[in-house]
Amino acid sequence: MNLSRRHLFAAAGGIAAAATVSACGDNSGGVGTTTSPTAATSGSATGASSQASNVTLQQWYHEYGEAGVKEAVEKYAAEYTDAKVTVTWNPGDYGKKLSAALLTNDFPDVFEVEQGGSLDMIQAGQLAELNDIFDPVKDQFNPAVVKRFTYDGKIYGIPQVVDMQLLYYRKSALEKAGKQPPKTFAELVDVANAVATGDMGGFFAGNDGGLGVLGTMFIWASGHEQLDEGRTKGAFLTPEFYDAVKAYADFYKNGKGLLKSASKEWYDGTPFADGETAMQWGGLWSVTDIKAKLGDDFGVLPFPAMGAKGRPAVPFGAFGACVAAKGKNVEAAKAFVKWLWIDQEEKQIDFADSYGTHIPSKTALVPKATKLADGAGADAAKFVAESGFTNDIMWSGALGEAYGAALSNAITKGVDPAEAFKGFADKVAAELKRLKG
């Protein structure tokens, strides 16, 4: 897994998250130093030229960490017959470069954006609306992803593939301790404490005790949303949320099963695969390596419900293929995006399944992805559909930082959660008013 995906999923569930998240991407949107663009001349699938248009489209991708992705997307572009598509592969800070390009006249026609577009891009009129090509097939896509991609009834990106976080558990360790996989947070604490030994921790979610990556999980798992439906105020400052924070604070302070230091961070499956911990919060991207090491001696779960009104939760992220609204070839670009990310299902399966482990955005394609056909992969795909959450498009970096500071005070310093979040409701309301202009 590359660092950009780590940043992306820190944003998905982290305490100081920006407004967007997705697969293999940087928290800001992901590019930096650009490699030379690859001219993928349209023609037949074999590369023979049969170009039906003089239109040339520029397409940008961030740098994926998995081998073979660059060659694959260049091949897809070369097989398109209605335009010449030039692919540019962008290592480094993709978000910074893309944001800068969109402020000039030198921007790509088609490009990836985390969660299908940021609020800033939408409000600036930089992204073309794609409802005309997406609405007829909307019900084919993962509903949780569609919900996050939609803003005021409009969609600005077509979902590509989905990545997610989840809870890994070692079957043999739980069986030895006489414990079942946890369905509630109280059970997770009980299991973690029961299975912990001098050589193996019970639960690991990062070398900060899980505070960073789990962050907003306490909102979703306690049964809340970040914002109310009208996006005018926070929707989670309740006794149930405070109780969830208290529960984790107690685990952080007193739980002998919480492993706070491991050989790698949460986003690397090595601590779990090597037996440093019986349970680990991690990413779907690790499932292949874990299976190679442990065989069938592991299972996966969503983060368990916190409190009587709680629910299981998993954070997810997805890049969307977007079209520049001010480009010279908007309709041609939309036609290409429709062809690749709506019509070409074999390519979508290949993109999701052949380079690491990802979930196709179309629900009907999930069983066709070999790594998701059964076992942990199939369970993970189901979790996203049933319990998937991600930061609201208006959960800004400022809100994430303020939330993180309050949460840190409650968990690491023992401040009563109600006191730690005192005044936070006013901060949310003021920030949302500012964002709406």
Image: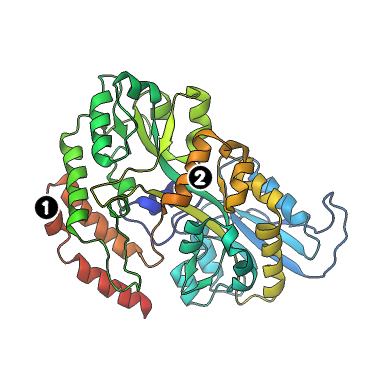
Q: Secondary structure at mark 1?
A: loop
Q: Please state the horizontal and vertical placement of residue 4, each as a whole percent of the image.
A: 48, 49
Q: Amino acid at mark 1?
A: Asp
Q: Is residue 81 above or below residue 210?
A: below
Q: Residue at x 28, y 50 (%)?
A: 310
Q: Quadrant of residue 344?
A: bottom right
Q: Please state the horizontal and vertical placement of residue 349, each as a whole percent of the image.
A: 65, 46
Given the current orientation, which residue lies at the most extreme bottom position?
Answer: 437
Give the label on residue 416, or none: 1
Q: Please state the horizontal and vertical placement of residue 196, each as a whole percent of the image.
A: 26, 24
Q: Please state the horizontal and vertical placement of residue 153, each as a whole percent of the image.
A: 49, 73
Q: Nearer the viewer, residue 309 or 188?
A: 309
Q: Nearer the viewer, residue 343 or 41?
A: 343
Q: Amino acid at mark 2?
A: Ala
Q: How many numbered badges does the structure rendering display?
A: 2
Q: Is residue 60 above or below residue 174?
A: below
> Decide: marks 1, 2 in contact (CB < 8 A)?
no
Position of 158 with respect to 343 (left or right) is left
Q: Residue at x 39, y 26 (%)?
A: 170
Alpha carbon distance from label 1 to label 2: 37 Å
Determine crowd level at label 1: few under 14, some 14-19, many 20+ residues with C-alpha closer than 10 A.
Answer: some
Q: Secondary structure at mark 2?
A: helix
Image quarter (top left, top right, bottom left or bottom right) of the C terminus: bottom left
Please give the residue where the numbered disc 2 appears in the rendered image: 381
Q: Is residue 433 above or below residue 38?
A: below
Q: Residue at x 21, y 68 (%)?
A: 425
